[in-house]
Each structure stands twice: as C-alpha cells, then as structure tokens.
Image: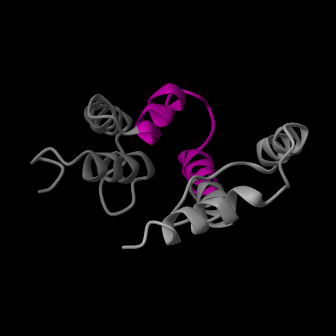
Amino acid sequence: MAAEQGSPYAQYLLGKLCLSGDGVPQDKDAAYDWFQKAQAQGHDYAGFFMDRIERPELPNVLLSATRLLYHMGKIFQSSAPAPQSSGIQIDRKRLAKLRRMRIAAGHKADDHEQEQTSSTMSMGW
C-alpha cells in the first residue's frame, strides 16, 4: 500500500522483492518499474538496481551489494567524530597555523582567551 501511495522506500523494497521473487512472483519488469518510481523520487539505491538489472548476475548478488553499501555507510557514520555543541570547529592544521600567526604578531599562544575573560569582567555589570 505504501508503494502505491508513493513512498520511495516502499517502492524500492517492493522492487527488491519482485527482483528476488521473495513472497511475490519473480518479475524483472515489475521490479524495474518500482525501481524507476523510487529513483524518480530520489532513492539512490533504486538507480543502482536499474543500472544493473539486465546483468547476468543473480539478483542475490545485487541484493548483497546493496546490503554491503548500507553497512559500510553505517560504519563510516558511526566512526565520524561527533559534532561539538558549541563554538567554532577548526581542524588541527588551521589551529596550529593560527597559533603560529598569533605568536609571530607578538602574542602569547593563549593570551586571547585571557583577554576575552578580562574584558567581560572589567565591564562592571
């Protein structure tokens, strides 16, 4: 029902079922149609299947490839550093360059932090 109502993920899943014949009669034409509908709505994996549906590999090879891509994406996503909740994020190389420039201008490496705290404290509010 969701595929008929236009859900791209449901259309993609129904295309996979039609391709593999899992629970429904195996039908490459119907699978291609469902993949095409899902891809038209931006589902990237549907395009992957459309590009490879006529190849001689068994559908299980294609299904395994998409599972592998999905899990690899999860691995990269889970190993990415968590974003910091506040402040500006600067990579190590830029931070080191900024410190060198600050020292070259005659400042101490961390005196800007002391300036910020002392200026807010000297306002007398």
Dominant SS of magenta comes to: helix
- Magenta residues (range): 44-69
Point out residue 95 in the picture as x, y percentages from the top left corner: 78, 48
Q: Quadrant of the N terminus?
A: bottom left
For residue 23, side relative to residue 117 (left or right): left
What residue sits 62% from the left and 32% below the top?
A: 56
Point out residue 72 in the picture as x, y percentages from the top left corner: 66, 56
Color encoding of the figure = one colour
**As displayed, is residue 104 above or below residue 112?**
above
What residue sits 57% from the left and 57% below the top?
A: 67
What residue sits 67% from the left and 62% below the top?
A: 113
**Residue 102 visible in the snapshot:** yes
Point out residue 22 in the picture as x, y percentages from the top left corner: 39, 60
Q: Quadrant of the C terminus?
A: bottom left
Point out residue 31 in the picture as x, y percentages from the top left corner: 34, 39
What residue sits 48% from the left and 36% below the top?
A: 49
For residue 100, side relative to residue 36 (left or right): right
Q: Nearer the viewer, residue 12 or 23?
A: 12
For residue 103, side relative to residue 54 (left or right): right
Q: Nearer the viewer, residue 109 or 23?
A: 109
User: Was residue 65 drawn as part of the magenta stretch in this picture?
Assistant: yes
**As displayed, is residue 50 above or below residue 83?**
above
For residue 13, side relative to residue 73 (left or right): left
User: Was residue 94 drawn as part of the magenta stretch in this picture?
Assistant: no
The total number of labels drawn is 0
User: Image quarter for residue 117?
Assistant: bottom right
**Residue 83 visible in the snapshot:** no
Q: Nearer the viewer, residue 74 or 29?
A: 74
